[in-house]
Image: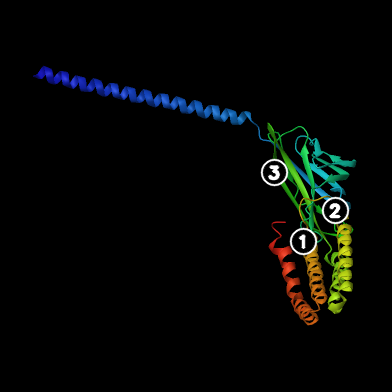
Amino acid sequence: MKASILISKSLKTYYKERLNYMTRKKFLILTIIMITTLTYTMGQACAAPLPSKVKAGVWITSIDKVDLAAGTYSIDFYLWFIYDDAPPNFEFINGAPTRIEKTVEREGYVEYRVKATFVQQYDFKNFPFDTQNLDIMIEDKTQNITSLELIPDSEQSGLDSQAYVVGWQPKEFTYQSYVHEYPGENYSRLVFTVSIQREIFPVFMKNFVPITLITLISLLSFAVSIQNYSQRISIGITTLFSAVAYHLATLGSLPPLSYLTLFDRVMLAIYSLFLYNIGVSVQGMRLVDKKQIDKAISFEDKAQKLLPVVTLFLIILYTVLLAPFI
């Protein structure tokens, strides 16, 4: 009996020691794995150096020409880089310099005077009250984002107060830095943007006053007796042709577009108003030919009273309601 008790105690001691040994062994293996993983991760982090940061700035002195038809603009500006290791081998992504001159160079700093022509994708949806963005896009030619990062010099960059664009008013100067993705690698890109807006009063006088006068001349046909329908129809058709010619001439400075501008939508409202005017005259002509003079006069009076409502409805329809679809 005592022998069996001793054997049982010995087995318990053996298994307990065995379990402690296996636990220590597993803990040691896990510790080795964690140390190895941590060492590898730290080694990888140390092996991949952080990209060199280069601060870049732009000071725009003048915007010489904004060519809407060609989709370009010419600009004169100073460009500088503040660096630690070496100056970047930069390039302009959306254009090319016609003249570039190094004006200042010292340790950690280089400055250029640049005159360049850039390609710009303009947005004419709100023409002639449109606002355009003029971009200067800069990247390094050889060093990607793992080697070099461009950051804007926000304190020194800007637009000169004497910079002036004929027919335009400088509105805002902004900048942004982001990573541009190419197949296989990414580059740091820096973009400086000048927003310009057309001068509202000259635009209104030049683009809308003439077409308003043409429309008023067309509507003067309501002052002509319905019995003289031939003169009324002649006025309506003549002014319609004048409006079409003016429309085409106004859009002559723009490139071919796949969408309608604000001016196009206003002209559609005017064309519809001309159609209303001519339609009233034609219907009056039919009634006069049938010797229904009183009925023709009554119809013309009702159409004339509806004219303000029809005009307002057409303007809202084309410039607001249908604007997202046309």
Looking at this view, is 118 or 6 the one in front?
118
Q: Which image quarter is the C terminus in?
A: bottom right
Q: Is residue 274 visible?
A: yes
Q: Which residue is farthest left?
A: 1
Residue tagged by mark 3? 178
Mark toward the viewer: 3 or 1: 1
The residue lying at 84 percent from left, 39 percent from top is 106
Q: CA distance from mark 2 to mark 3?
A: 31 Å
Q: CA distance from mark 3 to mark 1?
A: 37 Å
Q: Amino acid at mark 1?
A: Arg
Res 186 → quadrant: top right
Residue tagged by mark 1? 265
Q: Which residue is farthest front?
A: 290
Q: CA distance from mark 2 to mark 1?
A: 16 Å
The residue lying at 80 percent from left, 35 percent from top is 89
Left or right of 179? Residue 141 is right
The spot of residue 270 in percent (x, y) is 80, 66
Mark toward the viewer: 2 or 1: 1
> What element does badge 1 sit on?
helix
Q: Which residue is farthest bottom?
A: 294
The spot of residue 288 in percent (x, y) is 82, 76
The tag on residue 254 is 2
Classify 157 as above or below 321: above
Left or right of 175? Residue 23 is left
- First in sequence, mark 2 or 3: give its number: 3
> What element does badge 3 sit on?
strand
Q: Is residue 156 visible?
A: no
Q: Amino acid at mark 3?
A: Tyr
